[in-house]
Amino acid sequence: MIFMKKLKARKNITELEFLIIERIKRIRIEKGLSKMELSEAIGVSNSFVGKVESLSHPDKYSFKHLYKISKVFEIKSVRELIPKEIPRYGDIEIIYEMVPKKNKDGSQSKQLEANVLEINPIEKLT
């Protein structure tokens, strides 16, 4: 078994963007869609959703993406992808490590995914 070194990193992002990314990821997994399948369904490059979810890339969802994702998920409104409460913070710092993904058989993949270790507020909204 090959063990890869875990890579720690930091990323500043708005709390709203992070919450939207996490909500879409949760729904995507519940619906059994891979990152590539969702990317293809909304008409972007095969790696787009993976880049958004990885946190190591600057890619984010636009309103156009949210509209298309709501259609793919068969939900009534884009609002279901956005948190109901106003986020408490503008910017947050996410400390995460890149860890090997697990294959369906439980073995370790060569691909990495972000594992969030800590979220620190940077700017409190008033």
Image (tube, rainbow, N blue to C red):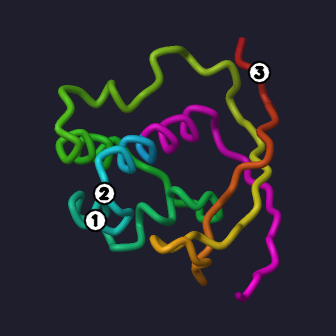
User: Residue at the spot x=54%, y=39% of the render?
Assistant: 17
Quarter holding the N terminus? bottom right
Residue to which mark 3 is pinned? 124
Q: Position of residue 32 (x, y in %)?
A: 31, 54
User: Residue at the spot x=20%, y=47% of the render?
Assistant: 72
Q: Are marks 3 and 1 in contact (CB under 8 Å)?
A: no
Q: Which circle's residue, 3 or 1, is located before the other in the chain? A: 1
User: Residue at the spot x=61%, y=65% of the render?
Assistant: 113
Left or right side of 88 for 47:
left
Q: Find the distance from the CA under tag 2 to the CA under tag 1.
A: 6 Å
Q: Nearer the viewer, mark 3 or mark 2?
A: 2
Residue to which mark 1 is pinned? 37
Quarter holding the C terminus? top right
Left or right side of 101 for 52:
left
Q: Is residue 15 magenta?
A: yes
Q: Is residue 34 magenta?
A: no
Left or right side of 122 for 112:
left
Q: Nearer the viewer, mark 2 or mark 1?
A: 2
Q: Is residue 13 above or below residue 109?
A: above
Amino acid type, mark 3: Lys
Amino acid type, mark 2: Leu
What is the crowding at mark 2: few (fewer than 14 residues within 10 Å), some, or many (at least 20)?
some
Range of magenta residues: 1-23
Q: Find the distance from the CA under tag 3 to the CA under tag 1.
A: 36 Å
Q: Are marks 2 and 1 in contact (CB under 8 Å)?
A: yes
What is the crowding at mark 1: few (fewer than 14 residues within 10 Å), some, or many (at least 20)?
some
What is the crowding at mark 3: few (fewer than 14 residues within 10 Å), some, or many (at least 20)?
few
Please give the count of numbered marks on the rendered protein: 3
Residue to which mark 2 is pinned? 33
Residue pushed farthest bottom? 2
Splitting the image into 4 quarters, where does residue 4 fall? bottom right
Front-most of residues 80 and 100? 100
